[in-house]
Image (cartoon, rainbow, N blue to C red):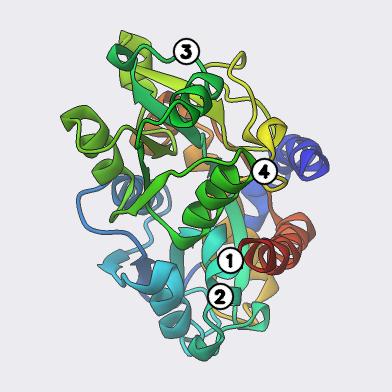
Amino acid sequence: MKSFVLSAAIAAVTMLGTATGALAEWKPNGPIKLMIAFAAGGGADTIARAVGDELQKRHGWEIQPQQVTGGGGLKLAAAMKSEPSDGTTIGMAITESYGYNMVANPGAGITLADVTPLTTVAGFQMGVVAKTSKGWKTIDDVIAAAKAGETLRFGTMTPKLSDLAFLLSDANNLNLNIVEVKGGKAVMNGVNAGDLDLGFMAGIQAKGVASGDLVNLASALTVPLAQTPEAPLMMDRGVPFGADGYFLFAAPPGLDPAARKALTDAIIEVVSDPSTKAGGIIKKAFGGTSIIKGSDVEALLEADVKAAKELIKAAQ
């Protein structure tokens, strides 16, 4: 995963010198449909719409956002694969849609051949989070409390995260009550209300952690969290998988190369500018952009598919 991030950083630098030419050579032959795999009004939906607004403002492209939710992004993937490959349809989902969710739902009929990935824009800051008032400092305190007999409710928001929570419980001989809810906001609301004792949050916890109301007990990533790098890794507590993932812009399969380059460069230009609404949200919630594009993002999705198969097998 680190190699993807490194090469993407290099690519982002070289992109700056070529973006203007690519954008000058290509323009859509009509309105661009922006499919969004997230519920209206949430943080991810806000980012997608903000990117669309800025693309329209900067380049004069007419952007038409629409919600295509359900199936962890698979409904969007299914809808998008039959759209024209001329740059007039793009979508924002998560890499998990084309990794774990695709692998776990073969009946959906989605494969990596059904998508042209454009670029990631932000990486999950997936932490295991609790209220500071619980008195826990790290995940080790949670493990100790569970072993002492406390029945703890662990909030998750996807089947992949439920599998990771199960592996944490299994590796440490715990009896965690894993509660899968709809979205990271529901996890945070449950933790704040006391309906959940702890749970996964992917950046939405940043404000609460900064204020001292919430604490990142562990990083669920393969690397430390940007906000609290001192928090231990779940991987060091017996979970051999990470919850690394990214918000991903993609297009239908077989996208025209000129359209792919122009759309990719234009999206990166928007999210990399912290003065834009999208760039500001990404910097605040996720510590900045995580740009992976071209062959690197294709390799990332292939690696996610392989890891998903291994995770599903391990959690059975």
Identified at 67% across, 82% down, the residue is: 113
Whichever of callouts 4 and 3 sits on the residue coming sooner in the sequence is: 3
Whichever of callouts 3 and 1 sits on the residue coming sooner in the sequence is: 1
Q: Disc 4 on helix, strand or loop?
A: loop
Q: Name the amino acid type tagged 3.
A: Lys
* Residue 25 visible, this angle: no
Could you classify mark 4 by the number of other residues whose Cα lies within 10 Å: few (under 14), some (14-19), or many (20 or more)? many
Location of mark 1 (residue): 100
Q: Nearer the viewer, mark 4 or mark 1?
A: 4
In the rendered view, would you say 145 is above or below 189?
above
Foreground of the two, 103 or 256 = 103
Location of mark 4 (residue): 239
Q: Disc 3 on helix, strand or loop?
A: loop
Identified at 67% across, 52% down, the residue is: 21
The image position of residue 22, as x and y in percent, is 65, 57
Could you classify mark 3 by the number of other residues whose Cα lies within 10 Å: few (under 14), some (14-19), or many (20 or more)? some
Q: Name the amino acid type tagged 2.
A: Ala
Looking at the rendered structure, the number of numbered marks drawn on it comes to 4
Whichever of callouts 3 and 2 sits on the residue coming sooner in the sequence is: 2
For marks 4 and 3, give the CA distance.
19 Å
The image position of residue 183, as x and y in percent, is 31, 51
Confirm or deny contact between disc 4 and disc 3 (CB under 8 A). no
For marks 1 and 2, give the CA distance.
6 Å
Could you classify mark 1 by the number of other residues whose Cα lies within 10 Å: few (under 14), some (14-19), or many (20 or more)? many
Identified at 78% across, 38% down, the residue is: 2
The image position of residue 29, as x and y in percent, is 45, 77
Numbered circle sitting on residue 137: 3
For marks 4 and 2, give the CA distance.
19 Å
